[in-house]
Image (cartoon, grey):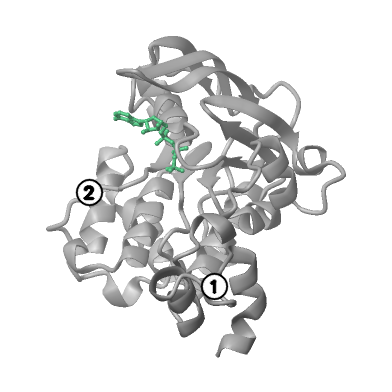
Amino acid sequence: MPDPTTVEGFETAGGGPSGGVPPAVRIEGLWKRFGQQIAVAGVDLTLPAGRFIGLVGPNGAGKTTTLSMATGLLRPDHGRVEVAGHDVWQDPAAVKARIGILPEGLRLFERLSGRELLAYTGRLRGLPGDEVDRRAAQLLDVLDLAGAQHKLVVDYSTGMRKKIGLAAALLHNPEVLFLDEPFEGVDPVSAQTIRGVLERYTGSGATVVFSSHVMELVESLCDWVAVMAAGQIRAHGPLEDVRGEAPSLQAAFLELVGANGRDAGTTLDWLGGGTGGAAGGNRTGGTAGGATGGGARGTAGGGR
Ligand SMILES: Nc1ncnc2c1ncn2[C@@H]1O[C@H](COP(=O)(O)OP(=O)(O)OP(=O)(O)O)[C@@H](O)[C@H]1O
C-alpha cells in the first residue's frame, strides 16, 4: 500500500495560519442567477488559510455554483472573490497559479495516458520537465495509479479519474485546492489514500476547500465548515462551533437547513417490494396489514 506521507514537494505551499497571511478565499456579495433560478443569493464568506474546509448543503443549495465562481470558471452577476489576496477576475493569472481544482463532472484529455496527462499539465503550469517527472512519479505511486499510468484516461474507472484529476490539481503545489465532491464514486481504499494525501497537504499549511453531502466525512476531515442552503450561507466557522450542542454535524445540518423530513412512510404507501407492501398498497388495499403506512410497517413482520 503506498504511503501518502511520502509525497514530497508540498512543503512550501503558502497560506499557512501564521500572522499576516491573507485568507484563502474572501467572497463578498456574490450573486448568480440562471434564468428565473437564483443559484447564489448574496454570499459573504471568508475562508481562513491553512484549514481543511467543508462546504456542505442539500442538493441545489448553490455549492457548485459558488465554487465555480470562486475559481474563475463562472462569472458572477454581482460580487467579488479574492483567493490568497488576489482578485479572481482582476488578476486571473495570479489566482490560477495559486489554485488547484477538481471540478464536478471533471473533463480530462481522454486520449492521453495518466502519465502523459500529468506531463502535459505540469508543462502547462510552467514546471521544468524533470521536476514534472519527479512529482508525477510520486503522485502516481501514492495514489496507487503507477500500474495504470500508461493506460489511456478514457479507460480509467470513475475512482481512477478522480485520482488522476487530483494528481493534476496538486502537481504545481497550489496554495488552495478546490474539490467538488472528491470522494464520489471512490472506493474506501482509494478514499483513504486520497484522505492521506489531503491531510499531508493541509499539514504543510495549504488550504483545502471541498464540497460534500457526506456529513460523517466532513466531520472527520474538516476543521472548518460552511453550511449553504437556498443560495445562502446558513452557518460557518470552526467545526465545533457549527455543530454546537447537536450530537453530530448531520443533526446540526438538518436543523440549519430546515429539513423537517418529508414523511415517506405515509406518502409512499404503495411502496414495499415485499408481499406486505405490495398487497397493502396496490392489490387488496384494505387488508389489516396495508391499510395505513404506519400499520403496514408495524405489521410487516406478521405479514411475511
Ligand atoms: N448552468 C445552469 N443552468 C441553469 N440552472 C443551473 C445551472 N447551474 C446550476 N443551476 C441551478 O442552480 C441551483 C444551484 O445549483 P448547484 O449545482 O450550484 O447546487 P449544488 O449545491 O452544487 O447541488 P448538488 O449538491 O446537487 O450538486 C440549482 O437550482 C440548479 O438547478
Residue type of the residue flagged with mark 1: Gly
Q: Is mark 2 within 8 Å of ligand 1?
A: no
> Which percent across, then down, holds residue 249?
72, 49
Return the residue nearer the eye: 291 or 71.
291
Instruction: Give the numbered dot on residue 204.
Output: none
Return the residue nearer the eye: 273 or 99.
273
Judged left or right of residue 1, residue 131 is left
Residue at figure coordinates x 52%, y 54% from the top left: 267
The residue tagged with tag 1: helix, strand or loop?
Answer: loop
Judged left or right of residue 287, residue 247 is right
* Residue, disc 2: 120
The residue tagged with tag 2: helix, strand or loop?
Answer: helix
Sort mark 1 into few (<14), some (14-19) or many (20+) by Cα contacts within 10 Å.
many
Residue type of the residue flagged with mark 2: Tyr
Residue at figure coordinates x 67%, y 24% from the top left: 21
* Residue, disc 1: 290
Q: Quadrant of ligand 1?
A: top left
Q: Nearer the viewer, mark 2 or mark 1?
A: 1
Return the residue nearer the eye: 245 or 271.
271
**One can see residue 303 in this view:** yes
**One can see residue 47 in this view:** no
